[in-house]
Image (tube, rainbow, N blue to C red):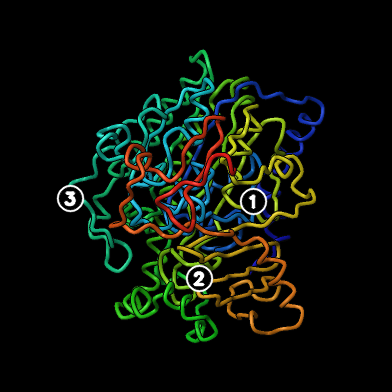
Amino acid sequence: PPTKQSVLDFLFQLNSEANEEAQQQQQTQKITLDNPNILFLPVDDLNTWLSYTGKNPQSKTPNFDRLAAMGLAFTNAHAASTICNPSRAATWSGIRPSTSGCYDNKDEPWTRFIAEGLNLNAHFKDNGWYAAARGKTYHSSKSGLHKADEKKTVYPSEWHEYPKSEKKPDPVPNHLAGFTQPFENARNYKDDHDPDWHTASYCIDQIRKFEERDGPTFLACGLIKPHLPFAVPQKYYDMYPTWEIELPPSPEDDLDDVPTMGWDMARPDKEDKNVTRLGRRRDAVQGYLASIRYADMNLGRILDAYEALPQSERDNTIVALFSDHGFHLGEKRHYKKGTLWEEASEVPFIWVVPGVTSPGSVCRRAVDLMSIYPTLCDLAGLDVPSHVEGANIRRLLENPDATWDGKAVSTMGYENHAVIDERYRYIRYQDGSEELYDHSKDPYEHTNRADWGGRYNTIKEELSAWLPKNGMRKWEKDQTCTDSYYADNDAFVKRCEDGSFVGRDPSDSCNFVDCHER
């Protein structure tokens, strides 16, 4: 695998002459952000198989590379959770799963756990930004404001507009198309048959309105690909012939030193066994790479509109791109997401902030997506609400090599967490079992060092200090509360009279922590 330094060198080579010129201009003219536009780009199920990372040399992603060359790319960024619903709820609200109690895709709708008015878009809207979105921003939010009061997948009060996603093509591709079965309709499938095409088109129109509006815009453009199904036009499959596909390393005995709870997350007797039985390991990788390339195409369309803005608008627009979590393609004998290993937690994370980030820069510090909320507030000159739990990474945007003692924390279910720094990944499960990986020697996490003793005990002790404390007990769907606030608001967080926020008591989720105890 490429070293982190080789990734850095590769990224700087993408546009070296333009970068040098831009950096010189930045040194001589400090750009001050004044109520900046926010171009918010969440992507679904996208791991770090992007060509600028060097993680998978087969991948071809010119537009992700293009965006990375414009600003700063983090190469050690991680999702707050490794599955869609809790990850997105945490990122948007600034409230970790261990605080909200939203742990799983089954915990729907997410509005049961996050109260109205707490989310990032609501905060910007309340402070004068025009809030618009389309596509998948929150989990199951593709319908936007359409029947939002009924579906409770977004809060209508938090958006000015959020049109419903374009209807899926007829016939709708099978959910497993391109994965465990072929996508039979690939040759007839066109770019504009997928909802993402229309989401990008909407966002392009909104970008063109930046200049027309009296105030700033907060625009979220949620791309669904490369989420299953891997249903994209044949031309994207043709870029990755199956006979040329190289599989990620996945030793047969890779789970032998993994605790039972890790094995249960991997489920090698299910997806891995099924893909192998069908002989579709290479087909699955091909479908995923093709879907990434389709997402890259739509990102390119959005970036074209962004780069067509007058320079004055670009100089006052922040771009932030990230994925809600990663994706396994056979590593650790697992497919899809929902584990605490590198493939599921690590995500692309790119920022373009005029006057703050330097073109083509790379940061190797460990961060997680909880940083988005406080950092955007800081950059836009807004106060950070008291309920927000993430770390402000502005210092790293300004200087990627700045001293940083923070860690990334990722959660998968109640009391299951991973803590990541620049060298190690420490995992502790609900039953107390552990894993520890040394990325300097073992980048694919094949060797669990948790029981090796010696200095590894010290490392575990240091990293365990970052584990969330007193996690919210998992909410059971048949659980009922007599508490009137819950009946009225159906959420796990409430606002106190002084404007602060409190969550439910971890030991009794029917009751809130007293406002005066916060």
Q: Which residue is mark 2?
A: 430
C-alpha span from label 2 to label 3: 43 Å
Badge 3 local density, few (<14 within 10 Å), some, or many (20+)?
few
Q: Secondary structure at mark 2?
A: loop
> Which disc, if any, is residue 171?
3
Q: Label 1 is placed on what type of residue? A: Phe
Residue 11 in the figure: left or right of residue 251 = right
| Of the pair 387 and 197, the residue shown nearer to us | 387
| Discs 3, 1 touching: Cβ within 8 Å | no
Q: Label 2 is placed on what type of residue? A: Gln
Residue 178 in the figure: left or right of residue 2 = left
Task: Please report the residue visible at 45 percent of the width from the left and 78 percent of the height from the top.
Answer: 263
Task: Please report the residue visible at 57 percent of the width from the left and 30 percent of the height from the top.
Answer: 498
Q: Give the mark, 1 or 2, whose residue is nearer the N terminus.
A: 1
Quarter containing the C terminus: top right
Position of residue 34 relative to residue 504, above or below, is above
Q: Give the label, 2 or 3, closer to the camera.
A: 2
Q: Give the label, 1 or 2, closer to the camera.
A: 2
Task: Please report the residue visible at 75 percent of the width from the left and 55 percent of the height from the top.
Answer: 405
Q: Position of residue 382 (x, y in %)?
A: 62, 28
Q: Which residue is mark 1?
A: 74
